[in-house]
Amino acid sequence: NVIHATSSISRSLCHLKQLLKGNGLLVLNELTRVQSFSTLTFGLTDGWWRYEDGYCREPHSPILRASSWEDQLREAGFRNHRSFGIPGGGQLVMISESDGIIERVQPKIQAPRPSAVPVSKPSPSPAASSVRPARTPSGGSTVKATLKELIGSSLKLSPESLEEDKTFTEYGVDSLLVMELTKKLSERYGTLDTTVLFEYDTISSLSTYLEPLHQSVSDEPVADHEEVLSSSPVSISFDSTPAAVPLTSEPEAPSSKALRAEQADTGDFDIAVIGLSGRYPGASDIETYW
């Protein structure tokens, strides 16, 4: 239930097809109807508005209806398409068979970067050469302690109650919390991919992955503010003729959905649950079920 949150459905299906052998089966579990709850929650994330192929999506949404999914799968070389789900339920499990023909996706070609401007630095002054080590994250706490602090804060649990070998899923960490935790960890250890918490899904395994990044942050020297101000100025010399950067096309104006995503990024949001509905085994409502 995530392929809709990619920029191009056809390109994503092509990538998935490369992972299958001939006659391999692709199983998709996807939303097929726009739902206010999904738009209200996942619409706060950048990935929800990342799509570039609005022609095959529902209006103002990344969701594809069932017939659009079937068209996209057929164009990507999948056959024997079957769908399973409750009629009108807004979500389907779809199974399609690969025809075994792989079309390579051409990578995007980027314009070459301009040549670097040479910078001549004078010998450092005694004051500037005196540096102090950067403070370690969370006042010198270990990586495991830092993870327990962050995860406990997000889940409203005490850090001491978190077990190091228990998976994040068992603690109720969903995709939205994964994005929140990834953002907080990136602020401490540098940019991290959102898949890290799925690949290393326990505090123990994640701390092992982050330990080298923690050491690099701790060992990096940082000059004092006053020492930087007292250092000698740096002279910069420019080439008489700067290198020209070829442009392949005119710069594109930001798209409307990019502007909407930028305007929506105004900080944290509090979400209140004001209603609940569902299907409960052996019960007609939630009170009877519990």
Image (spheres, grey):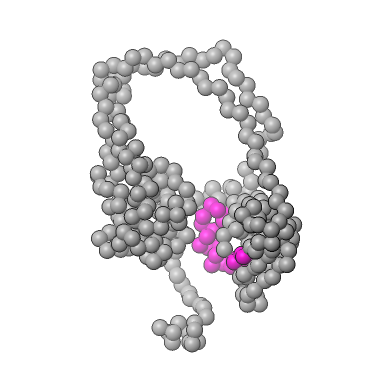
Above or below, comparing residue 159 to residue 133 in the picture: below
The reply to whether the magenta stretch includes residue 45 is: yes
Q: What residue do we see at 48% from left, 87% from top?
A: 283
The reply to whether the magenta stretch includes residue 155 is: no
Q: Is residue 189 left or right of residue 131?
A: right
Q: What residue do we see at 36% from left, 42% from top?
A: 213
- Expressed as whole percent of the image width and height from the top left, the position of residue 127 reads 25, 20
Q: Quadrant of the C terminus?
A: bottom left
- Expressed as whole percent of the image width and height from the top left, the position of residue 89 reads 62, 75
The answer to which quarter of the image holds residue 270 is: bottom left
- Expressed as whole percent of the image width and height from the top left, the position of residue 264 reads 52, 52
Q: Residue furthest front?
A: 22
Above or below, comparing residue 58 to residue 101 in the picture: below
The answer to which quarter of the image holds residue 231 is: top left
The answer to which quarter of the image holds residue 268 is: bottom left
Residue 224 shows up from this direction: yes
Please state which of residues 208 and 51 is positioned toward the viewer in this rendering. 208
Above or below, comparing residue 223 to residue 2 in the picture: above
Boundaries of the magenta span: 27-49
Q: Quadrant of the N terminus?
A: bottom right
Q: How many marks?
A: 0
Q: Residue furthest top?
A: 240
Q: What residue do we see at 39% from left, 61% from top?
A: 168
Q: What residue do we see at 51% from left, 55% from top?
A: 45
Residue 225 shows up from this direction: no
Q: Is residue 208 left or right of residue 83?
A: left
- Expressed as whole percent of the image width and height from the top left, the position of residue 152 reads 32, 59
